[in-house]
């Protein structure tokens, strides 16, 4: 009897030791990492811009007084490239993502057209800044589709002249509104890439052009209303600070 009890005790002890050894050799369970768009981010972009500049005579002083006020001088098409950076913050609640973003871009968007007979009107835009709010939804795991809207500022240089003879130039920084659509994909814990389209319309600004050379030395100052519209298509990357959210069980 004692022999049987000893054998049973040895069998139980060996089984327990083997089970404990198996537990010791197994790796601990790691909770899954859950992606979240919440956090600050910083990035860069490149793209193209195109649009129109409408110029209309609002008043004139001097020898060209016979030109009717309200005359449309030109509708100038312009296009070119841009590049810059953006910074923002996203907050995710369920599948909905809210955000705010600031962008600034250097631009080389320009165009020229004949506006009065042999006189040429030229517009050149060299920088653009926007501040927008964003709202979007997460689809297909790590893809964010969003809409955005807010305010925009653009530096515009407008001129009138005869190439090689004279030029009158003025610059403005009009305020405008912007609406946009985009999609962004998180291809890493911290990195994402996006594609985006924006439409921007700016307030009317009045500039003064000296047209005296056209009247043989007399005085001719034209006040001209300038209105810019701009479309932008761009691609870029963002770096989000902080890693994914670790799920707790």
Image (cartoon, rainbow, N blue to C red):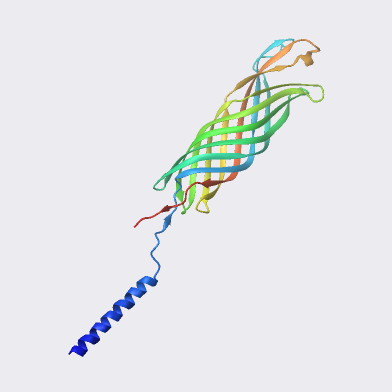
Number of disc labels:
0
Closer-to-camera residue (137/21): 21
When asked about the image quadrant of residue 77, the answer is top right
Q: Is residue 160 above or below residue 88?
A: above
When asked about the image quadrant of residue 160, the answer is top right
Q: Is residue 9 left or right of residue 143?
A: left
Q: Give the position of the N terminus as an image quadrant.
A: bottom left
What residue is at 48 percent from the left and 52 percent from the top?
142
Q: Measuring from the top left, give residue 237's x and y in whole percent.
A: 57, 46
What residue is at 78 percent from the left and 10 percent from the top?
218
Closer-to-camera residue (73/155): 155
Closer-to-camera residue (117/83): 83
Q: Measuring from the top left, give residue 71's x and y in whole percent.
A: 67, 18
When asked about the image quadrant of residue 114, the answer is top right
Q: Is residue 196 above or below residue 129?
A: below
What residue is at 66 percent from the left and 23 percent from the top?
171
The furthest residue to the left: 1
Q: Give the position of the C terminus as an image quadrant.
A: bottom left
Q: Measuring from the top left, give residue 212's x and y in whole percent.
A: 76, 14
Q: Is residue 40 above or below residue 163?
A: below
Q: Measuring from the top left, give residue 38's x and y in whole percent.
A: 44, 45
């Amino acid at each position: 009897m004692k022999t049987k009890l000893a054998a049973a005790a040895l069998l139980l002890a060996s089984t327990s030791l083997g089970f404990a050894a198996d537990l010791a050799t197994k790796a601990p369970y790691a909770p899954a990492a859950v992606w979240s768009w919440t956090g600050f981010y910083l990035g860069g972009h490149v793209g193209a811009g195109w649009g129109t500049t409408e110029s209309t005579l609002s008043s004139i002083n001097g020898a060209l007084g016979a030109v009717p006020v309200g005359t449309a001088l030109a509708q100038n098409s312009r296009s070119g490239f841009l590049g810059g950076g953006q910074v923002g913050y996203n907050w995710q609640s369920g599948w909905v993502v809210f955000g705010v973003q600031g962008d600034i871009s250097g631009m080389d968007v320009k165009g020229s057209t004949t506006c009065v007979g042999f006189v040429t009107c030229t517009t050149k835009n060299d920088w653009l800044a926007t501040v927008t709010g964003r709202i979007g939804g997460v689809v297909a795991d790590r893809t964010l589709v969003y809409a955005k809207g807010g305010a925009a500022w653009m530096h515009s240089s407008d001129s009138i002249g005869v190439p090689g003879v004279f030029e009158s130039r003025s610059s403005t920084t009009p305020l405008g509104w912007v609406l946009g659509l985009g999609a962004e994909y998180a291809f890493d814990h911290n990195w994402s890439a996006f594609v985006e389209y924006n439409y921007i319309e700016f307030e009317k600004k009045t500039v003064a052009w000296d047209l005296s050379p056209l009247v043989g030395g007399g005085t001719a100052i034209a006040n001209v209303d300038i209105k810019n519209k701009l479309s932008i298509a761009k691609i870029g990357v963002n770096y989000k600070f902080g890693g994914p959210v670790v799920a707790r069980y």
